[in-house]
Image (cartoon, rainbow, N blue to C red):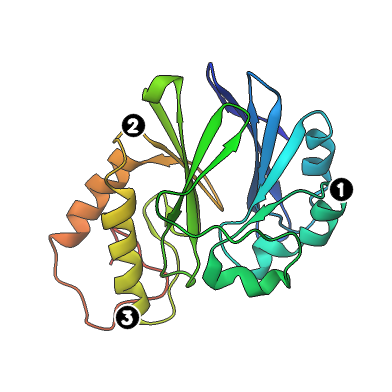
Amino acid sequence: MGIHYQDRDIVVYKTSCGPYDNNCYLLVCRMTGESAIVDTPEDPGAVIEQAREADVKAILITHNHMDHLAGFDTVFGAHDVPVCIGTADGDSLDGKGVGEWIAGPDIHHVGELKIRAIHTPGHTPGSTCYAIDTEGGEHTLLLSGDTLFPGGPGRTGSPELFTQEVQSITGRLFPLPDHTVVLPGHGADTTIGIAKHEYGIFASRGHAEDLHGNVTWLGD
């Protein structure tokens, strides 16, 4: 689990876990050493080991799909701390440490870091992204789970859910600064500026009314 991003305020460690190459992140406040773990995939041993060197204060779950929760009991067993998950997805954890954290103005403090929960339904009803402003707002990070990836949105199960997810992305994520670094639940990073550009191309074209599933901005 190596350093993936760092600036004056935060160090972000990233590791790929489990058979679906889930990204698991450890967010560490430089000022205090306090930290948060984002998602708990299968085989989280490297995450737990790295987190032993930090003062873990929270586990943040982006959504309730099992590839993001398969290692939850192991991580929670090592770090018995408050758990944040979207209200509509919370039942998946059977109340284990869950302080249901709905979207809106909710801000969670991890040391000097202010982490904003953004409710982004579509991929799941309770999908939640976490935004962090660092270095006086000059930099912004977005932990996007499976809501937004490089090149497109997360998989959806119906045209209605696809529409809902696009509304979540355009209405709740695209207002973030273009320089926002997007750290998704799988794969490589992107930025809000790049995602907006790609979506603009997608939106300029006609599409089938039943479009859903694995959609890409430049390919559908």
Q: In this view, does 48 lie above or below 214?
A: above
Which mark is drawn over residue 129?
none
The Cα–Cα distance between marks 3 and 2, rounded to whole angstroms, is 30 Å
Q: Residues within 10 Å of mark 3 (few under 14, many from 20)?
A: some
Secondary structure at badge 3 equals: helix
The Cα–Cα distance between marks 2 and 1, rounded to whole angstroms, is 35 Å
Q: Do the residues labelled 3 and 2 touch (CB within 8 Å)?
A: no
Which mark is drawn over residue 160?
3
Q: In which quarter of the image is the N terminus?
A: top right
Q: Where is residue 79 in the image (x, y as percent from the top left)?
A: 82, 46
Task: Determine the image quadrant of residue 77.
Answer: bottom right
Which sits earlier in the primary sequence, circle 2 or circle 1? Answer: 1
- Residue occupying image coordinates x 80% and y 52%: 75
Please give left or right for residue 92 compared with residue 128 in the image: right
Q: Position of residue 218 (x, y in %)?
A: 28, 57
- Residue occupying image coordinates x 63% and y 29%: 111
Secondary structure at badge 1 equals: helix
